[in-house]
Image (spheres, rainbow, N blue to C red):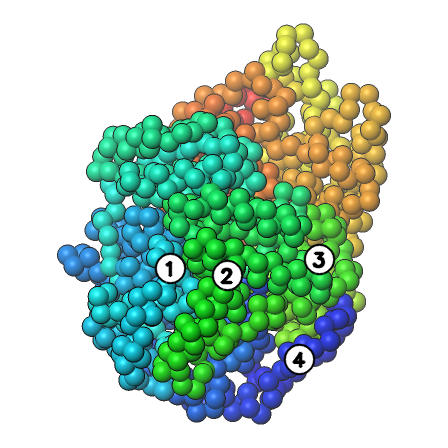
């Protein structure tokens, strides 16, 4: 984290749009903030950050709420926590404990000091397999505990869908549950002891028998025994309020269990002893189809006697159409376990027999089960958009009712939604009666927020009428705490206040949560955002052309903060977010960058708009891999946002040298071609002092080798070859006698000037498949050559990109005529990043030119072309293993299904790794990026190459991927076209 004086103001610049909010939260007094920062810096050994970046990154969690902290502290250990608490107590500054920042009720935000436990206090301290316990720190991500427990056949029972980024401290603070709570209970059921610090410095070890109770707590409870025995609903998912009934003598007076779900309002957790359970050796998943969600909900409770591990439910409005689920309008996902696969399957089949379903299936294959669970886990993000693209928000994310009443509750819930003109898509833990839902509240206008309040009050009454809890998993926070009197009555709420005062008499721990709460309709995250659209270059068609709406897409579920990408070739393999995996810094995650853009638009913490150095620095390590475009559940597209920001940031200003060299690479390479000076460029680059000088002047990393320019471009080879393209009649055609399909092979900059062998190989393969190959029109000598604009887009030179793209459309105008006989021929693009640019950036940069959409729709990858237009062609049989990488843009935009099928048809076995190669066009060549670039390659690509057996073919369709491998390994990576062409007969003389 950076450490800056909060009193210093950055260089002022224009705001992106006027801020209509008449009452923004004021900045802290500079003198008081300086005093606080200085005191913390003297006593805390971890990082102390009061700069704009750190504050902006922690204004929000995954809720509807926003608060600007004074600063952020990353404590190294419990002593650091104690030191920070002492300073804050002395100065009267509130403290908020924060883990992964995925809380949905607002409890991970605050206006004082945020304690970030994820940086240092993130370890498994010890694990006792015999005792089935582990000692963990609060910043430990759940998946890391699962990985430590797995070799012993153990696991931690609760598993929220955010398991790849939520922390144990957050789970304890919220009393999280997850999909397996029907088998293993809530977090409170799995906690043995907690080490807690009070704001006044008391170190407590909370556990059964009043262990760790502050003075006065036992007496308070003893005086209220009768009320505590009758005042709490008996629910498997009662998370709302303080769990005071855990302190009843017949329940062991368990202070640790009581503290679970207290949301950091009573003490600060520094260590926990948790229970581990036996992990089933085998699992099966029964997917049960029902007519609608109410039918599924009514069936869920009846399956519990069969002892399932999970009973999850979701309806069709959250399921993609190609998910492969059995027939129905809603589904239950019922997981079973066993010592053997046969036993697990038998139990799943017993579930199917016991269920009254429209259709069903049982899945035992691990990859198949992961694919289905990913649909369920991504619902927390996909639910933020209605099918028509309308935004939907949390706020009533996890009410719970008795499981037997769930069907009736859902019917009443739907009626209540309709009465307010609202829509939502319920899903969740049907076996526990807990429902998640995002609702299309209008939180941008006074009328909309008024409706939000009225609906919330009526829904609270409905939940209570069904004997339920306002929160069944995510806690009350600010979203529901104001309504707790409707659930518990005033007497119990006053009791909560008395408990708070015993633990935190100064009211400094997470104030405004649970007791004496903020109103549910204040501190809304959207209040400071501009109401009028910001002037931007891209079209943002999915967001109505509104950049602010695009930034609002990030709701904070933080899938971008996962550190494991999933097995290569699996359905849960992902690219997002390579720079976060390399640095572990929040500002280098997709969420962190979206937060900074949000604050840039708000203009309160980041005050210089598009000129912001904070946003620029955070985006500097964005590789523009586009992984978030597909892997983020809500489709945040940070590569586009980065290009947009750079476009405005450098408007009318001098750019970094790399923008002029690599950003305008097509210009320089065409100049080299026209002057026939490739030999000279290569000779100069081979002289180390000259190469070093050129790299320094060009903003290129000194560690990088300058790639060689081809002596003869692909187009020159094509012209020398002659216009009469050869085809193999009949082969690859749909029917004998059909004329060969003509395809236009796109001579992208990389194929044209740096790797013409790929183009030559593609021509050979396409012709061998019975296709006729042509190139796009050229006005001669490269002056009017097609270009996808990729290098301009990636460096934010969007005016140049639009110029290049308009010139391209003009060149292709005869082919793009909608009345053209035969229609637009397929356009084959060999470089995945260029294909992705034509598919997405082109229509978004030129949304008013209908030719842009037509060209984008004609773009095909090499494998797509063969699959669609030469379906009966049989590739040469290679029968060898492959290793390498699926290009990140192919993963995110194009899809790799045709490539996998083509490799399979050619007898190429094995899966390509996911992730990003780290070079990513200009990124890995830019000065200062080398270490992060190679760290990204080490995430998946380089380990896969090192693990490959001798004789394995190394595949990488992207020029950047091949260059990264050339410069970091001794391998010779190939484009798939090159590998196939090398095994075609009669290829000599080409």
Q: Earlier in the sequence, mark 4 or mark 3?
A: 4
The circle drawn on residue 547 is: 3
Give the residue pinned by disc 1. 233
Q: Nearer the viewer, residue 573 or 101?
A: 101
Give the residue pinned by disc 4. 10
Q: Nearer the viewer, residue 316 or 102?
A: 316
- At 49% across and 85% down in the image, what residue appears? 93
Which-is-in-front pick, marks 2 and 4?
A: 2
Which-is-in-front pick, marks 4 and 1?
A: 1
- The image shows residue 687 at horizontal and vertical percentages of 57, 57
The circle drawn on residue 104 is: 2
Is 444 situated above or below 315?
Answer: below
- The image shows residue 313 at horizontal and vertical percentages of 45, 42
- The image shows residue 645 at horizontal and vertical percentages of 69, 62
Q: Earlier in the sequence, mark 2 or mark 3?
A: 2
Which-is-in-front pick, marks 2 and 1?
A: 1
- The image shows residue 21 at horizontal and vertical percentages of 72, 72
Which-is-in-front pick, marks 2 and 3?
A: 2
Q: Earlier in the sequence, mark 2 or mark 4?
A: 4
Q: Nearer the viewer, residue 829 or 351?
A: 351
State the separation of the CA atoms marked 4 and 3. Answer: 24 Å
């Amino acid at each position: 984290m950076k450490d800056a004086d909060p009193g210093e103001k950055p260089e002022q610049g224009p705001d992106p749009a006027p801020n209509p909010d008449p009452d923004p939260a004021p900045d802290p007094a500079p003198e008081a903030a300086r005093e606080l920062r200085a005191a913390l810096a003297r006593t805390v050994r971890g990082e102390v950050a009061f700069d704009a970046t750190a504050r902006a990154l922690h204004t929000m969690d995954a809720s509807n709420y926003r608060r600007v902290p004074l600063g952020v502290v990353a404590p190294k250990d419990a002593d650091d926590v104690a030191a920070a608490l002492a300073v804050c107590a002395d100065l009267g500054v509130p403290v908020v404990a924060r883990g992964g920042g995925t809380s949905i009720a607002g409890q991970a935000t605050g206006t004082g000091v945020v304690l970030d436990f994820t940086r240092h206090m993130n370890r498994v301290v010890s694990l006792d397999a015999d005792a089935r316990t582990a000692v963990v720190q609060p910043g430990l991500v759940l998946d890391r505990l699962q990985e430590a427990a797995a070799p012993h056949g153990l696991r931690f029972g609760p598993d929220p869908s955010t398991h790849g980024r939520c922390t144990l401290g957050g789970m304890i603070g919220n009393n999280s549950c997850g999909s397996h709570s029907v088998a293993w209970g809530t977090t409170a059921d799995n906690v043995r002891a907690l080490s807690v610090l009070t704001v006044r410095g008391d170190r407590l070890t909370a556990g059964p028998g009043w262990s760790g109770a502050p003075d006065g707590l036992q007496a308070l409870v003893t005086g209220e025994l009768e009320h505590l025995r009758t005042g709490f609903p008996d629910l498997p998912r009662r998370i709302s309020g303080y769990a005071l009934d855990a302190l009843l003598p017949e329940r062991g007076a368990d202070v640790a269990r009581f503290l679970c779900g207290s949301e950091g309002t009573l003490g600060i957790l520094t260590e926990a002893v948790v229970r581990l359970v036996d992990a089933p050796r085998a699992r099966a998943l029964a997917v049960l189809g029902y007519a609608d969600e109410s039918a599924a909900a009514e069936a869920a409770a009846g399956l519990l006697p069969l002892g399932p591990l999970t009973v999850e439910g979701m309806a069709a409005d959250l399921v993609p159409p190609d998910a492969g689920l059995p027939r129905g309008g809603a589904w239950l996902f019922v997981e079973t376990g066993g010592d053997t696969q046969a036993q697990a399957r038998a139990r799943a089949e017993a579930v199917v027999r016991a269920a009254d379903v429209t259709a069903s299936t049982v899945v035992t294959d691990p990859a198949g089960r992961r694919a289905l669970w990913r649909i369920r886990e991504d619902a927390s993000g996909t639910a933020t958009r209605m099918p028509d693209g309308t935004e939907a928000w949390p706020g009533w994310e996890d009410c719970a009712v008795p499981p037997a009443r769930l069907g009736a509750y859902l019917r009443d819930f739907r009626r209540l939604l309709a009465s307010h003109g609202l829509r939502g898509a319920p899903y969740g833990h049907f076996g526990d009666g807990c429902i998640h839902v995002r609702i299309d509240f209008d939180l941008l206008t006074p009328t909309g927020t008024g409706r939000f309040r009225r609906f919330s009050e009526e829904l609270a009454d409905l939940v209570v009428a069904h004997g339920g809890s306002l929160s069944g998993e995510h806690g009350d926070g600010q979203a529901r705490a104001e309504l707790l009197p409707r659930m518990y009555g005033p007497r119990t709420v006053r009791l909560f206040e008395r408990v708070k005062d015993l633990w935190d008499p100064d009211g400094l721990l997470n104030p405004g949560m649970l007791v004496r709460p903020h109103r549910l309709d204040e501190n809304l995250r959207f209040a400071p955002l501009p109401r009028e659209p910001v002037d931007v270059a891209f079209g943002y068609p999915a967001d109505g052309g509104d950049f602010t709406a695009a930034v609002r897409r990030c709701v904070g579920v933080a899938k971008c903060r996962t550190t494991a990408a999933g097995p290569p070739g699996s359905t849960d393999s992902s690219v997002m977010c390579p720079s976060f995996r390399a640095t572990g810094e929040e500002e280098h995650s997709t969420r962190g960058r979206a937060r900074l853009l949000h604050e840039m638009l708000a203009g309160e913490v980041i005050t210089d708009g598009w000129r912001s150095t904070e946003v620029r620095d955070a985006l500097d390590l964005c590789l523009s891999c586009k992984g978030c475009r597909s892997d983020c559940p809500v489709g945040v597209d940070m590569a586009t946002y980065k290009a947009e920001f750079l476009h405005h940031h450098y408007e009318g200003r001098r750019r970094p040298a790399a923008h002029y060299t690599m950003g305008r690479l097509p210009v320089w390479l065409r100049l080299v071609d026209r002057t026939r000076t490739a030999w000279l460029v290569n000779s100069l680059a081979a002289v180390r002092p000259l190469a070093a000088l050129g790299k320094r002047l060009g903003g290129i990393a000194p560690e990088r080798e300058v790639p060689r320019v081809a002596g003869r471009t692909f187009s020159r080879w094509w012209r020398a070859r002659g216009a009469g393209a050869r085809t193999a009649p009949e082969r690859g055609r749909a029917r004998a006698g059909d004329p060969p399909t003509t395809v236009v092979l796109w001579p992208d900059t990389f194929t044209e000037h740096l790797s013409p062998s790929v183009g030559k190989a593609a021509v050979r393969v396409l012709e061998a498949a019975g296709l006729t190959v042509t190139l796009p029109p050229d006005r001669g000598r490269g002056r009017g050559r097609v270009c996808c604009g990729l290098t301009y887009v990636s460096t934010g030179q969007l005016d140049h990109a639009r110029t290049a793209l308009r010139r391209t459309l003009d060149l292709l105008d005869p082919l793009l005529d909608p009345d053209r006989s035969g229609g637009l021929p397929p356009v084959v693009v060999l470089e995945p990043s260029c294909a992705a640019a034509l598919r997405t950036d082109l229509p978004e940069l030129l949304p008013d030119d209908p030719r842009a959409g037509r060209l984008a729709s004609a773009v095909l990858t090499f494998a797509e072309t063969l699959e669609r237009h030469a379906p009966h062609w049989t590739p040469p049989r290679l029968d060898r293993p492959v290793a390498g990488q699926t290009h990140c843009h192919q993963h995110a935009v194009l899809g790799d299904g045709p490539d996998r099928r083509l490799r399979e048809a050619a007898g190429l076995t094995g899966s390509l790794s996911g992730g990003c190669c780290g070079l990513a066009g200009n990124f890995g060549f830019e000065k200062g990026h080398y270490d992060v670039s190679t760290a990204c390659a080490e995430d998946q690509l380089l380990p896969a190459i090192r693990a490959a057996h001798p004789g394995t073919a190394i595949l990488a369709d992207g020029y950047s991927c091949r260059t990264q491998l050339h410069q970091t390994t001794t391998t010779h990576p190939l484009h798939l076209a090159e590998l196939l062409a090398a095994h075609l007969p009669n290829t000599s003389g080409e």
